[in-house]
Amino acid sequence: MSQFSLDFINEPAIPLKIEGSHPMVQLTKTLPWHEMIEVAQSRRQEQGKRNSGPKPHYRGLIGAVLVRSLKSSNYREAEDLVRNYLPARYMCDLHNSHWTPDHNTIFDFEQMLGQEGLHRLNVLFLHQAQELGFLDPKSLCSDTTAQEGKVPYPNEVGLMGGFAKSVKKAVRSLGKKAQKTKEKIVEKTQRIMTLVREHRLFAKSKEDRLGLAEEMSLIIGEVQGDLKKYLNSLNPSLLKSYDHVAKKKLESLQTVMTTLLPQIQHWVKTGWVAKNKIVSLFNPDIRCIKRGKVGKNLEFGLKWGINQIKGGYISLFETEEMMSCDAQYALKSVDHHLEIFGEVPKEFGFDRAAWSEEHLKDLSNMGVERVGVAPKGQAAWLVSNTCRKRLVRERAQVEGKIGTIKKYGMNRPEDKTTNGMKRAARRAELCFNLKKLQKDLFSLHQQDIKVMI
């Protein structure tokens, strides 16, 4: 049986026939592969990687990333699709080849591209759709959305307990180095975990719970000082590879808790949550976002802006700092649109959260002729009734697209790091636009068939 399998693997490549009308085949023939390869090469150069060893299979790896985005699959499923699904092999230009990238290779390539590389690929697809007449950049509607992180509810006691548990585990993995300081840290973290158990099971009154929380915060302050001494006593030259991992984890936890501990102490003293409180020990960039929605007043994650160009295509954008005012996101959405298409939209729609005289003037000064922002109170629309109805209709479609990209893997992704969450958002963006382009190409193909008949 093993001899048969070996003979089968070593057989020469057999040309396989695939229907040219298949949506994925039509999409493959339309995509700007040369420009996409240039994006991958530029990202590789930006990260300082030299062209040593065999030349990367850019064409096949980019195709694998697109297949993974289109099918919303994990890395192993993407490997299986590229290996056994003929349209996917055609997209990777491997339909007459025995070579297939494995899941590790696809992962490394996507890590190399990063969220910036995925965004540049999406810009290429938007330009391709514009050239084919599927979108019109003169009309734009925007909104904001929250990308929820896969984190537990961030109460102060839970964060302190998670810190103690993680520190204890990391310190123990470092072996017998600096044993006396290590024993102090382990003893104090064990005490914190005991207090967490008492807080959850036996504290009945508010005073008891606050008293236990205050005691925990004081012990964590002591642990912070012990951790600093412990990390300084470690000799990097004597550490093994797994020791470096544990040391890096301890340094990260200490850095995060340096900012988080005063926020916890502020809550213990006042009963109010500190502004911009850290909600995750391992992803400190996640923040609490007030949504004000029925059934979901708060969300914990990253905030994105989403642009919908006339024709149904979308583009996500982010800001360096999470802005609380949606009117600022309205200005940023026009700037983002200008970066992609080189021109500001003639008409722009946004919900009433962006209604601000100052920001409306800024939009007009940027060159937007028809500012269709929903007014607050008794104010009147700044556009004609015909334009208002059109923008309201297009603006309502943005909500549906937000729900769609969240189903495509944007919301609560498996990767809990900030960069991983951003890549998940970009993959969902790619998935939506690729499927939209695929659908438009198929509709155009069907129209051509009817004309020929």
Image (spheres, grey):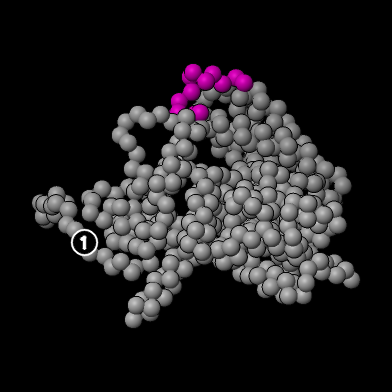
The residue sitting at the bottom extreme is 453
Q: Is residue 152 visible?
A: no
- Tell me the residue at 45%/57% (across/down): 69
Asked if residue 233 is among those painted magenta in the image, a careful observer would answer yes
- Tell me the residue at 40%/58% (across/down): 30
Q: Position of 83 compared to 69: left or right? A: left
Q: Quadrant of the C terminus?
A: bottom left
Residue 231's quadrant in the figure?
A: top right
Q: Position of 95 compared to 338: left or right? A: left
Q: Position of 215 compared to 279: left or right? A: right
Q: Position of residue 85 (x, y in %)?
A: 30, 61
User: In this rendering, is residue 167 above or below 366?
Assistant: above
Q: Position of residue 263 (x, y in %)?
A: 78, 42
Q: Position of residue 173 (x, y in %)?
A: 51, 33
User: In this rendering, is residue 368 above or below 417?
Assistant: below
In terms of secondary structure, where does tag 1 sit?
loop
Residue that carries the numbered disc 1 in the rendered image: 16
The answer to which of 208 and 56 lies nearer the viewer is 56
The answer to which of 162 and 379 lies nearer the viewer is 379
The image shows a total of numbered marks equal to 1
